[in-house]
Image: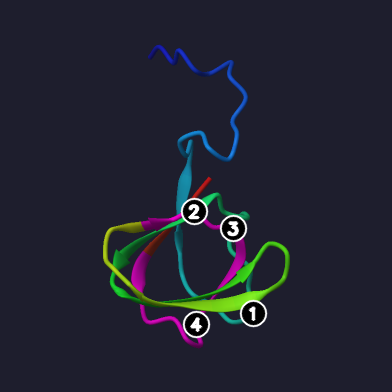
C-alpha cells in the first residue's frame, strides 16, 4: 500500500498514526503517552497529564476527541467508556 506521508515527520498537529484501547486504572499508566483521546461513551474523564497535573473533564460527549497528552486515565472519577488513546 502506498503511503505518501511515510517519510514526513509527525507533529502534534498531524493526524494520529496509531491507537490503542484504554482501560481506566488508578495505578497503571496508559500504554504510551497520548496525542489525543477518543471518548466513545459519554461521561467524565479523569486523567493525569504527561506533565503530572491531574484533572477531570466533566460531561465529555460521546464521539469527542480531546487533544490531550496524558500518562494515566484514572478509574476513580472516570465514567466515560470506550476510550481510545491516539498517538
Q: Which mark is residue 67?
A: 2
Secondary structure type for disc 2: loop
Asked if labels 2 and 4 touch by Cβ distance under 8 angstroms, the answer is: no
**Residue at the location (60% across, 62% down)?**
70
Q: Name above or below for residue 19 compared with residue 10.
A: below
Q: Quadrant of residue 79?
A: bottom left
Between 55 and 16, the residue placed more toward the observer is 55
Between 20 and 45, the residue placed more toward the observer is 45
Name the residue beneath numbered marker 1.
Answer: 27
The span picked out in magenta is 65-82
Tag in front: 4 or 3:
4
**Residue at the location (72% across, 70% down)?**
52
Between 39 and 59, the residue placed more toward the observer is 59
Name which of mark 4 and mark 2 comes first in the sequence.
2
Name which of mark 2 and mark 3 comes first in the sequence.
3
**Residue at the location (28% across, 73% down)?**
42
Name which of mark 4 and mark 1 comes first in the sequence.
1
Q: Name above or below for residue 21 compared with residue 27.
A: above
Tag in front: 1 or 2:
2
Tag in front: 2 or 3:
2
Name the residue beneath numbered marker 3.
Answer: 31
Amino acid at each position: 500500500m502506498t503511503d505518501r506521508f511515510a517519510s514526513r515527520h509527525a507533529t502534534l498537529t498531524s493526524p494520529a498514526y496509531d491507537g490503542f484501547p484504554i482501560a481506566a486504572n488508578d495505578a497503571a499508566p496508559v500504554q504510551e503517552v497520548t496525542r489525543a483521546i477518543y471518548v466513545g461513551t459519554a461521561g467524565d474523564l479523569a486523567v493525569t497529564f504527561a506533565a503530572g497535573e491531574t484533572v477531570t473533564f466533566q460531561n465529555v460527549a460521546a464521539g469527542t476527541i480531546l487533544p490531550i497528552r496524558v500518562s494515566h486515565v484514572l478509574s476513580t472519577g472516570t465514567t466515560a467508556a470506550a476510550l481510545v488513546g491516539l498517538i
